[in-house]
Image (spheres, rainbow, N blue to C red):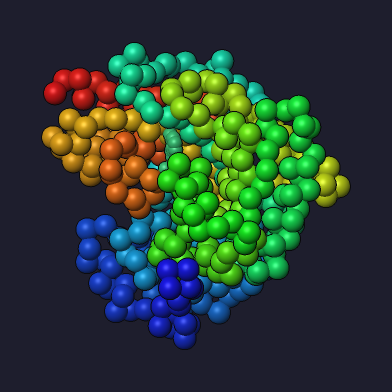
Amino acid sequence: PDYDFQFEASLAKNEYPSAKMDAARGREHTSLAAQVCTEALWDKLKDKKSSGPAHWTLARAINTGVMYPESFVGCHAGDRESYDDFAEFFYPVIEAYHKGFSMEKGSDLQGTPSERMDPERIRVELSDSAQSKIISTRIRVARNLSMFPLNPGGTRESREAIADLMEQVYATIPDGSDLKGTLYRHTTMTDEERQQLIDDHFLFRGGDRMQAASGYHEHWPHGRGVYLSRDKQFVNWVNEGDHLRIISMEQGGDVKGVFSRLSRAAAAIEAGVQQATGETDVFMLHPKFGAVTCCPSNIGTGMRGSVHILVPKLIEAIGFEEIDALCRARNGQARGSSGEHSAVVDRIDVSNWRRIGLPEYELVEDMINCANYLAEREDAL
Ligand code: ADP
Ligand code: MG
């Protein structure tokens, strides 16, 4: 049941979910979707459909936030066009999440992607103390392919076509490359294999109720897969939520090494999709903010860099929520031991919070600063 899409009852009838919205507004944490989607705005946009392949509606866009008022963002795009077609809704959500970013001004990133992802431009380093507490480092970018709807607005066929295309793309990676690997599809993996990959932090979990409410899990497990290089340091998630999560990860705290692999890998995947499709603009890009993703939190660079860090005394002393608040005050975020919406078992996932308007190397700096700060707090206890 956690994989099934459920439409909230009022939204399914295309009616404003007044009761749910009133209840949501009474809470301390209210999704951005509920905050922005007033009844007046709803009335204005409720019969509109996006001009893209998903024919997205406001009802579908806000379903997660209405069903789960505790979600932070609570809305999703069904196709690239959704963001502009529902600008009166999405732009305020974007500006509320990405504080300081203005849709009117847009982002003004200088330099090419490989310049912005140049590890030599990172100006801070993990402290020795932080290094000693770090289990592993992972940096990913979210990317979606221009020729398909975003997954919340997709079909079984679009998801399968994406996985088939990626299989061709992975075949373009030369055998001698450290990026060479294998695409494992959910339809042919055993449950045990899948669980092992999840436990080892290589694979998305699926079955997340908030993600289910966005439509991420529809037609599960079709078209889902994970590409793993032989050393498992280059990983691609295929059709979790976004079409692609391009991931570089390894044990330890060599942030520059991880970032450098990511830069190289993202360029290789882009070139591979260009070669396989004959298209030049293969990743969905928006003129104002850059990479287009299903969730407004990821737009822009689509990059989240994280370290898994052990700070047991700090967890004991102030708890996870307080650690997260400390990170938020430093442009960072804390997550549980197995990713978003997971519990803290031992390690904490510390990452950059911002994704937009700043070059990727600066976002890596946010993560490093956060990890250093937590290590310092741990040492003071
Ligand atoms: P995202 O959507 O940003 O890719 P999620 O929180 O949804 O992240 O899931 C992240 C997955 O990657 C989880 O399995 C998590 O345990 C794993 N992960 C995150 N950071 C690290 C890290 N630094 N080292 C190893 N695994 C990590
Ligand atoms: Mg995620």
Residue 179 in percent (x, y) is at: 68, 32
- Front residue of 294/50: it is 294
Asked if residue 105 lies left or right of residue 177, the reply is left
- Front residue of 318/56: it is 318
Residue furthest out toward the right: 278
Q: Which residue is drawn at the image coordinates 35% and 52% (left, top)?
A: 341
Determine whether 139 is above or below 54 in the image. above
Determine whether 281 is above or below 233 in the image. below
Residue 235 in percent (x, y) is at: 59, 39
Q: Could one spot residue 352 in this view of the protein?
A: no
Residue furthest out toward the bottom: 13
The quarter of the rendered structure image containing the C terminus is top left
Asked if residue 93 lies left or right of residue 309, the reply is right
The quarter of the rendered structure image containing the N terminus is bottom left
Total residue callouts: 0
Asked if residue 281 lies left or right of residue 1, the reply is right
Residue 142 sits in which quadrant? Answer: top right
Residue 19 in percent (x, y) is at: 29, 79
- Front residue of 352/138: it is 138
Q: Which residue is drawn at the image coordinates 72% and 49% (left, top)?
A: 166
Q: Could one spot residue 161 in this view of the protein?
A: yes
Residue 226 in percent (x, y) is at: 60, 48
Q: Which residue is drawn at the image coordinates 39% and 49% (left, top)?
A: 340
Q: Which residue is drawn at the image coordinates 56% and 15% (left, top)?
A: 120
